Amino acid sequence: MPSSVGIKVGTVAIGGGAPVVVQSMTLTPTRDVEATTAQIAALASAGCEIVRCAVPKLEDAEALKRIVRLSPLPVIADIHFNASLALKAIEAGVAAVRINPGNIGGPDKVELVVNAARRAGIPMRIGANSGSLPKHLAELAHADQAEALVEAALEEVELLEKFDFRDFKISVKSSHVPTMIRAYRMLADKVPYPLHLGVTEAGTPFSGSIKSAVGMGALLVDGIGDTIRVSLTADPVKEVEAAFEILKALGLRERGPVMISCPSCGRDNVGVENLAVVVEERLKAYPEAFEVAVMGCAVNGPGEAGDADFGIAGGRDVGFLYAHGRVLKKVSSETLVDELFVEIDRWIEAGMPRPKRLKMAKPAALAMAEASLIPLD
């Protein structure tokens, strides 16, 4: 079930029907204010909406005041084991704190942090990771780790509710995708609070993005999840890029163009792989949301390219440029990509009008054959 309760991290709404929020975490030592704020700026440029900073030491907590002042994004302080650091982070003006109530020093310490967050008017993030479950749940974790994750999270929820504090979001993250999916499904049936999704320690950009897409996508498509972080062993900008691709693929968010391209086969006579790489790279400069198809031959070209706002279908010497379901022109293969972007720029300048689509009644190969009769520009 989607969360019915919403919170705000700074000015960013999470849960309660708000769009799914993308967040990431800085890799720099937080006490290095210059490096940390530079990384936050890069994340903001990539579309990140909330940023988390690790606070393992006093110097990190003391640096937060400047970071918060300089950051274009709401800053969450990530705290483990030390309640006093959480209190200092709240004093520094962070937009939220992430704590694990099970390792912060007991219920009394948790209450101190809760009361400070309440006074500051900021939310918290709580929850469990499969790698740091409480010892008393070890037997349950051995039998069913997903159930143990949910039980750990519910214990934390019960504690915060005991302190009459309900301004929080929850995570039950695991590096094992099926466990993560099962845990969030169980938790979503039991609580109304916003859920922070993630496959923890997912891996490198290639494998980690796939794991994250499978895990978070399976939940998001059913309306489970309010904010996501793709945890990659990489520059955190890559996390934000992957997160938006997941949300764009599900139709949940728009940020920049979507490109579709054929997988190539023995019919490819234009080198569609290289063509797609060139188009994708040039599309990165566009913040507008639209769809571009890159096809390598006549079989899928008219149909697939016709479904996109713009499309190109290549050939040995000439290619075809499509716009909004119609063949726009036939051009030399050497200028095909440049012509595509000329038309895209012209369309954007005109206000991105989308004409009524015409259904393609003819077979793709026949439509391509007829299009081949168009004079070359």
Image (cartoon, helix red, strand yellow):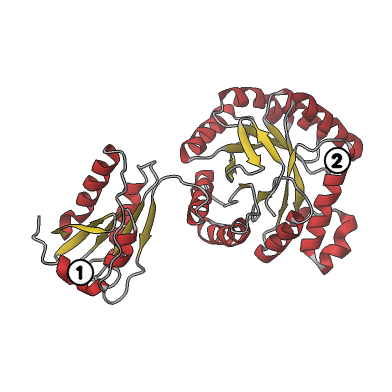
Using residue 144 as the reference point, say whether residue 162 is left or right of it: right
The percent coordinates of residue 335 (x first, y second) are: 17, 54
Q: Is residue 151 above or below residue 53?
A: below
Q: Identify the mark nearer the N-term, 2 or 1.
A: 2
The percent coordinates of residue 369 (x first, y second) are: 17, 71
Which residue shows up at 67% across the image and 43% down it? 16
Which residue shows up at 52% across the image and 35% down it? 39
- For the question of whether residue 105 can be seen, the reply is no
Q: Residues within 10 Å of mark 1 (few under 14, many from 20)?
A: many
- SS at mark 2? helix
Q: Nearer the viewer, residue 104 or 228?
A: 228
Using residue 26 as the reference point, say whether residue 61 is left or right of it: right
Q: What's the amino acid at mark 1?
A: Met
Instruction: Examine the image and state in which quarter residue 350 appears.
Output: top left
- Mark 2, mark 1: which one is toward the viewer? 1
The residue that label 2 is drawn on is 161
Q: How many numbered marks have been drawn onto this rendered protein structure?
A: 2
Instruction: Examine the image and state in which quarter residue 64 appears.
Output: top right
Disc number placed over residue 265 in the picture, else none? none
Q: What's the amino acid at mark 2?
A: Glu
The residue that label 1 is drawn on is 368
User: Do labels 2 and 1 touch, CB within 8 Å?
Assistant: no
- For the question of whether residue 369 can be seen, the reply is yes
The quadrant the N terminus occupies is bottom right
Marks 2 and 1, how far apart at CA:
64 Å
Which residue shows up at 60% across the image and 30% down it? 32
The percent coordinates of residue 142 (x first, y second) are: 83, 67
The percent coordinates of residue 341 (x first, y second) are: 25, 47
